[in-house]
Image (cartoon, rainbow, N blue to C red):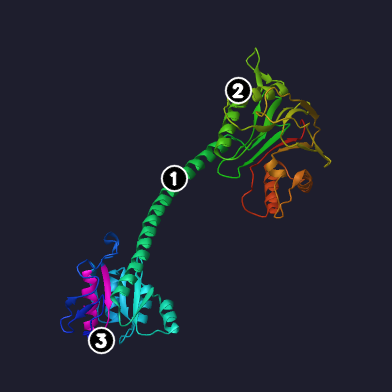
Amino acid sequence: MLTLIGDMRRLRKGTYWWDHMSAEPLQKTGPDRGRADHAGMDPASVTRRVLVVDDSRLQRRILTSLLTSWGFEVTEAASGEEALAICQAGAPELIISDWMMPGMNGLAFCRAFRDLESDHYGYFILLTSKNEKMHAAQGLDAGADDFLTKPVNKDELRARLNAGERILAMQRLLTSQNRIIRQTLEKLQAAHDSIDSDLLEAKKLQQSLVRERHRNFGPAQISLLLQPAGRVGGDLVGYYPVDGTSFGCYAIDVSGHGISSALLTARIAGYLSPAVPEQNVALRALPDGGFAHRALEEVAQHLNALVLGEVTTEHYFTMVLAHFDMETGQMRMVQAGHPHPILQHADGRLEELGQGGPPIGLLPGMAFEEVQVQLCPGDRVLIQSDGIIECPDPQDRLLNTEGLCRILDRLREVRGTALLESVVWMLADYYGGGDFPDDISAVLLEYPGPA
């Protein structure tokens, strides 16, 4: 039980002289006379609900009267069980509880209070006559925030409440800020979901640029691989028929990743359109209404001028553009910064093609060189992006051209799209799983030869 100060009949400076029967202040003494007792506390920030827990009715009335004079709304509980029921209905922000009570003592009540689910923090002060450090440790471990030693001093109680108010004010501020952050995150998540949905549609549109993944021209076959690293990518592959005996094909890799790179690939796809040969910069119209190949170095120069002059972007791209004559087996190509294509002869020998060359859209007035390659029946050419040869293993060792050649040697008997899919599977095994760090694309030109 709480020991009353001097049996509540002694007058102490700065305290009340209480009548032990009525618990009403009979006389106010000391420096606080004539001024509000909540001086020094910010009224706007005072928590109005306080729960006082003590099995002594007199002690509850003493604390209640004092707290009420400071502007608090006080609820009383005569036991830990009653206090817990009150907290379950709506936990106050400040609790002052005696430690020694029959049944559920203050320590057990504090533990039970901390186990309750609540959207705000409750500041818990334990009243105790125990001064041992062990008991303080027990209280802190149970969830108490502060202690008051009996007999309670008014100024000390007010100081403890001020400290609790500062903690609760910070907690309210953090709760408000967390609510704003949560609302902001919800808005960001909604925006992310909307963007992700748009990117999925953009991916479908980008994939639609490659309408056919395999085409059998009879004497020659062509297969395409396009696998962006993200939702959309900067790689582009394709082909376009020219006449009954020849066709063109290309592999393009735009610098960077993401939406801006994908938009440029869509623009370039229009320049090399198979559906509208009149707009294909790699073809020239004939008087009879047909079309023929333009010189490939001229096509590369024209694309370079278009990107620098008409497309306002910081991106550039690498490219291999090739024309293939199915009657003669002759392939003409221009290489603009793209990795060297690999020619795999019918006997399995592997050979790199091309002379390198500058990327397109990087500098004006660049010159490009056309290369001619003679294919024999059974030969095939793989035009791959740097996402393949620069794929790292778990130790960050790149596959390189030598690694790709080893893969092609192991897959000598595999043809068409099955070869490209097998390359991707073996590349994923080399990488170690997960999404590739770069776009993966390739064009496979196979020349069985005329029937």
Residue for point 42% across, 85% down? 132
Q: Marks 1 and 3, Cα distance to the nearest angstrom?
A: 67 Å
Between the residue at mark 1 and the residue at mark 2, the CA separation in whole angstroms equals 34 Å
Q: Circle 2 is placed at which residue position?
A: 309
Percent of width and height locating residue 250? 67, 31
User: What amino acid type is highlighted by mark number 2?
Assistant: Gly
**What's the distance in space between the residues labelled 2 and 3, CA to CA?**
96 Å
User: Which residue is identified by label 1?
Assistant: 191
The quadrant in which residue 54 appears is: bottom left
- In the image, 90 versus 29, the foreground residue is 29
Q: Can you tell which of label 2 and label 3 is closer to the viewer?
A: 3
Q: CB atoms at circles 2 and 3 under 8 Å apart?
A: no
Quadrant containing the N terminus is bottom left
* Residue 377 x, y percent position in the rendering: 80, 34
What amino acid type is highlighted by mark number 1? Ala
Q: Earlier in the sequence, mark 1 or mark 2?
A: 1
Residue lying furthest top: 287
- Specify few, some or many for label 3: CA neighbours under 10 Å numbering under 14, 14-19, or 20 or more: few
Q: Quadrant of the C terminus?
A: top right
Classified by dominant secondary structure, the portion drawn in magenta counts as helix
Query: Which residue position is annotated with label 3?
Result: 6
Task: Work out whether mark 2 precedes mark 3 in sequence or the reverse, and give the earlier one.
Answer: 3
Can I make out residue 345 in this image? no
Q: Which residues are magenta?
A: 49-69
